[in-house]
Amino acid sequence: MKITRIRTYRPRPSNPNISQSDLAVTVETDTGLVGIGEGGTPDLLAHCAAMLIGEDPARIQHLWQMQYRGYFYPAGREKLHALGALDLALWDLKGKALGVPVYELLGGRTRDYIECYSTSFPWQGSLGDTARACLAAGFRAFRTGVADPKGEAFNARRMVEKTVAEGKEIREAIGPDGEWSVDFHTRLDLPDAVRLAHLLDELNPLFIEDPLRSENPGALAAFRAQSGLPLAVGEQFGDKWDINELVERRLIDYARVTLPNVGGITEMMKAAAICETHAVGIVPHFTGPIATAALVNCLSTFSGKVLMEYNYSGVPIDYLPECLDFKQGKAYTNQRPGLGVTLDLKRVTPIGEVTQPGRRNVYTRPDGSLTHW
C-alpha cells in the first residue's frame, strides 16, 4: 500500500480548543482502504500529512519518527497533536488491513472494560444530587474542579474556600465509600494549591488533577513534598520525554497523558511502558470522541491502574454512527477492525486535502532507519 491522499474534516459543531480538537482526518491509500483519526489544526495537519504522501502506511514507527524529526525542530505540543491524529489513522488503517481491532495489534486485552469518571455529568439541581446520580449511573467517580468565579475576577483565596465547601457537599452526598476527584485546572499558584490540598485531605478525594502549570516541574516537586494526596498530572504535557521526568522523579501517581495529544497510539504505548515500570497508573484526559475510542483500545492492553475521564455519557454523535461502546459508566472494547469507528462524511465539512509529498528534513542511515538532518 501507498498513502495517496489525506483529508481533514470539521464536524458540526466543532470544539474550538486546540487541546481537545475534534477535527477528523482520513488517510487514503491506493488500495481503497481508509484510516480515520482525529485532532490537530488544519495547518499542522497539512504540515505533517505532506511527509506521509507516497509512504507505506504499515511502517507506523518509521512514519512517526519522520514526522517528529522532520522540519528540524523537535515537535512542540501543538504539532504532536496533529502528528498524533495522523498516527491514530495509521493504526486504524492497519487494523482494517489485517481485519482486527487495534487492541489486538497491541497485545490483546488485559481487562474486561475501562472504568470511567465523569466530567460534565448532567446537572441534577445541586452539586450533591449530581454527584450521587453520577455514581448511581455506574461511573467510578464524580469529578469536579476548582470553583468557578462566575465571571468575576479570580480571587484564589476565595475560590479555595468555595472549592472546599463544594467538596464537603459532594462527600456528604456520596457517603464515605463514594469516590470523587477534583481538577485544580492549573489555576492556582503554589501556596494556594498547597493550602487547598491540605483542606481537602479530610474529604479523601480519589486524586487531585493538575495542581500547577506544566512549565516548571520543579514547582510540582515542591508541591509533591507538601501534599500526600494522590496526584494525577499530564494534561498539558506531551511525548514520552515529557512524561518520563514526571515518572522518574516520582512526582505523580497517575499520568494524564492522552490521545492524540501525546503523539498518537505509537507514543502513548511508550509512555504507558514508562508508567508500568514505575507502578504509575494512567488517568487520561478526554479529547474528541474518535480519540476516546482509540484510548479504549490502548488502555484495554495496559496492566496497571486505569481510569478514563469521559464526557459524552453515551449520547449518540451524528457523524459517528459507530464509535466506542459505552454503558453504565464503563467503556468496552468491540470486535470491529481498526479503532472501531465509522465516519459519516455527509455530516462533516471538508476543510483540507494533501496529495503532494512535502519536504522531509531527515537523513537515512545505511540500514534504512532515520537520523536528524
Image (spheres, rainbow, N blue to C red):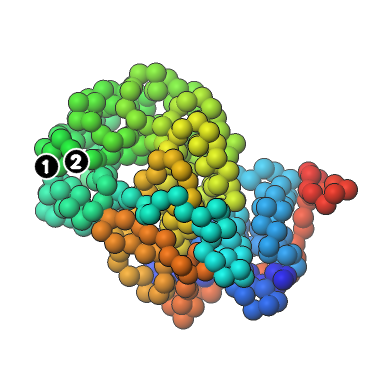
Q: Is residue 289 visible?
A: no
Where, quadrant-wise, is the C terminus in this rendering? Answer: top right
- Image height of 190 relative to 180, above or below: above
**Nearer to us in this view, 289 or 325:** 325
- Image height of 256 relative to 263, above or below: above
Q: Are marks 2 and 1 in contact (CB under 8 Å)?
A: yes
Q: Which percent across, then down, holds residue 197?
A: 28, 26
- Image height of 219 relative to 272, above or below: above
Check residue 178 in the rendering and tell me which mark sits there, or answer none.
2
Q: Label 1's element?
A: helix
Q: Residue furthest bottom?
A: 346
Q: Earlier in the sequence, mark 2 or mark 1?
A: 1
Q: Which percent across, then down, holds residue 153?
A: 27, 38
- Classify residue 305 as left or right of residue 49: left
In the picture of the structure, the residue carrying the numbered disc 1 is 173
Q: Label 2's element?
A: loop
For the point 72% across and 71% down, the residue is 1
**Nearer to us in this view, 11 or 150:** 11
